[in-house]
Image: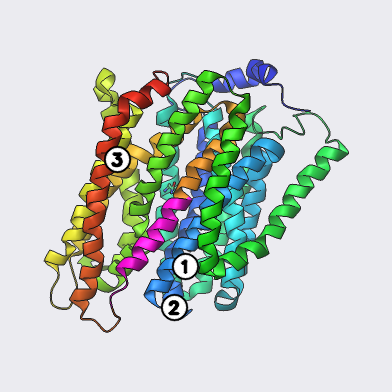
């Protein structure tokens, strides 16, 4: 049995959802809040990872960087798996609840004994995020009918929710970890996730006919075969946890995994296209161009949790503002999100003001890379403001984050929205999975880049250590400029593939 797409499109409840008045569908606010708590959990855990591994697991900085990159890469790899199983077996609703519950269990597992259960708890959370993250974004896309030009604004709002959660989690978990012990950091992440999953569960009915399993359409009882398949997915995801654990705790396996998984996912995606029309295929190829470029964007941007976290912790001077001490690591973990929250409406307004001159998606992506280059130029310039002690300015560091964030706003929410504009609905899970899989490769490359920068001897003078990082940032500046220029050059071709989509 499959969902009858034509009947679904004519369902009066769906028509009512999609014919919403005003700027946003009301369901978006619930998704906004569920995702906000999920991101609180995710960024809370992520914010403490590198420092936790160095201070509690006694890792050296290069290893911590690699390990951080591997963990993040696995998280985002699992999103492809989660998106695939949502499209084919579970549907969005079940996937989101299942993923959320796994994240709750994962966070509390680490909280129970941070030093000994760190890897197992993290592995559970990795699988959980894979089921939650791509699918909640997919549901946002489902709220819009084709051609509704309010979609970008919806994703911009959703992106603010992501970042409110990220800012609160990044701040609170690091604060709790440092002030009261790491178990509190991880426990607070678990509580946040519990709120997120409960929120989704309680409001899922507002989604009307959306998000049901293709094997068990709404209002039907699962056949034994369908039930077995669904239970099989749950069991399979639990069984994958020891495998993830093995892969995460041995970074040499990560390389093999990453070499394999991307090409396999791509082959599967191309195979899945066999049922698509010519226009659908061209649009999906345009989506693929965005996905490929986003790998590079995230590889640079995601220095945030690795090398930039180390620069913040060891090379930036804390500041006093109104008598309060501002910890650079907190700035590193939260300023990006705060800037997203503040700037996202402004950037939205700017696009609206530009009206017919509003840049198309390809040009926005190009701008994203130019701002990223500007941000890394500023991170690179930290060396010029550093003393002999290798300690540099928090203000330059924060300003660099501001510029980098403008780049993110030109690329990340726009990319999410474009995925759901360019893919047919039955492929929303898999296209979102691929979009985040690109982040996995970005994260993986970010770890390698960061480890390269941390190669300077531990005994080297502080200024030399800082230069290791800033020289790296200079190279990233150049590469980001090249990517931006390339996008501008191929823009007409990609627009053709998009079939005049904005
Ligand atoms: N910061 C965004 C989020 O957490 C984007 C992450 C990504 O795609 N790498 O959703």
Residue occupying the point 75% across, 29% down: 217
Q: Residue at x 72, y 59 (%)?
A: 239
Separation of marks 3 and 1 at Cα, in angstroms: 28 Å
**Which residue bears the numbered disc 3?**
368
Provide residue 323's location: percent of width, then percent of height. 22, 68
Residue 42: where, in percent of width, then height? Answer: 50, 56
Residue 157: where, in percent of width, then height? 42, 36
Q: Nearer the viewer, residue 227 or 319?
A: 227
Answer left or right for 357 relative to 226. left
Kindly indicate whether the residue at mark 1 contacts the one at mark 3 (C-beta within 8 angstroms). Answer: no
* Residue 322 in view here: no
Q: Residue furthest right?
A: 224
Report the quarter where the N terminus lies: top right
Q: Quadrant of residue 169?
A: bottom left
Please tell me whether residue 450 belongs to the stretch shown in magenta: yes
Q: Is residue 41 above or below residue 198?
A: below
In the rendered structure, the answer to whether residue 129 lies left or right of residue 363 reads right
Query: Which secondary structure lies at badge 3?
Result: helix
User: Do residues under tags 1 and 2 come within 8 Å of each other at their CB atoms?
Assistant: yes
* Mark found first going from the N terminus, 3 or 1: 1
> Image point 31% across, 55% down: which residue?
335
Which residue in the structure is indicated by mark 1? Answer: 67
Which residue, given by chain and number where applicable, does mark 2 sit on? 59
- The answer to which of marks 1 and 2 sits earlier in the sequence is 2
The quadrant holding residue 109 is bottom right
Question: What x and y, as percent, mark residue 475?
Answer: 24, 56
| Label 2 beta carbon within 8 A of ligand 1 | no
Decide which of tag 2 and tag 3 comes sooner along the chain: 2
Q: Which residues are magenta?
A: 440-456
Estimate how packed mark 1 is, as few (under 14), some (14 to 19) or many (20 or more) residues with alpha carbons within 10 Å.
many
Disc 2 element: loop
């Amino acid at each position: 049995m499959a969902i009858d797409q034509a009947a679904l499109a004519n369902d009066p409840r769906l028509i009512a959802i999609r014919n919403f008045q005003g700027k946003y569908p009301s369901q978006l606010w619930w998704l906004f809040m569920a995702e906000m708590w999920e991101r609180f959990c995710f960024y809370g855990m992520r914010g403490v990872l590198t420092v936790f591994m160095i201070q509690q697991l006694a890792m050296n900085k290069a290893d911590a960087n690699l390990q951080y990159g591997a963990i993040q890469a696995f998280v985002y790899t699992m999103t492809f798996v989660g998106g695939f199983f949502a499209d084919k077996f579970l549907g969005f609703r079940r996937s989101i609840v299942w993923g959320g519950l796994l994240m709750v269990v994962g966070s509390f597992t680490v909280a129970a004994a941070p030093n000994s259960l760190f890897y197992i708890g993290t592995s559970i959370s990795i699988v959980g995020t894979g089921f939650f993250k791509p699918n909640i974004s997919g549901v946002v896309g489902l709220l819009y009918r084709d051609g509704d030009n309010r979609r970008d604004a919806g994703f911009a709002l959703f992106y603010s929710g992501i970042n409110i959660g990220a800012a609160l989690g990044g701040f609170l978990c690091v604060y709790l970890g440092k002030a009261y012990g790491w178990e509190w950091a991880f426990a607070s992440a678990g509580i946040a996730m519990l709120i997120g999953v409960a929120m989704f569960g309680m409001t899922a009915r507002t989604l009307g006919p959306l998000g049901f399993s293709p094997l068990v359409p709404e209002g039907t009882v699962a056949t034994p075969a369908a039930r077995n398949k669904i239970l099989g997915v749950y069991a399979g995801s639990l069984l994958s946890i020891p495998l993830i654990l093995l892969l995460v705790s041995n970074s040499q396996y990560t390389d093999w995994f990453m070499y394999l998984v991307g090409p396999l996912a791509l082959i599967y995606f191309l195979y899945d296209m066999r049922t698509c029309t010519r226009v659908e295929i061209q649009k999906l190829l345009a989506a693929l161009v965005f996905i490929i470029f986003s790998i590079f964007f995230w590889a640079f941007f995601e220095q945030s949790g690795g090398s930039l976290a180390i620069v913040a912790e060891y090379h930036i001077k804390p500041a006093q503002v109104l008598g309060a001490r501002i910890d650079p690591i907190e700035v590193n973990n939260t300023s990006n999100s705060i800037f997203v929250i503040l700037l996202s409406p402004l950037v939205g307004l700017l696009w609206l003001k530009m009206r017919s001159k509003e840049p198309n998606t390809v040009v926005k992506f190009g701008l994203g890379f130019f701002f990223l280059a500007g941000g890394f130029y500023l991170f690179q310039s930290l060396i010029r403001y550093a003393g002999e002690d290798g300690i540099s300015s928090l203000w330059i560091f924060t300003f660099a984050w501001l510029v980098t964030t403008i780049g993110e706003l030109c690329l990340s929410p726009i990319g999410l929205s474009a995925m759901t504009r360019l893919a047919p609905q039955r492929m929303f899970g898999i296209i979102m999975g691929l979009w985040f899989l690109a982040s996995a490769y970005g994260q993986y490359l970010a770890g390698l880049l960061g480890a390269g920068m941390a190669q300077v001897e531990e005994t080297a003078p502080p200024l030399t250590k800082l230069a290791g990082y800033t020289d790296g940032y200079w190279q990233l500046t150049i590469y980001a400029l090249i990517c931006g220029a390339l996008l501008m050059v191929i823009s007409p071709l990609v627009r053709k593939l998009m079939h005049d989509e904005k």
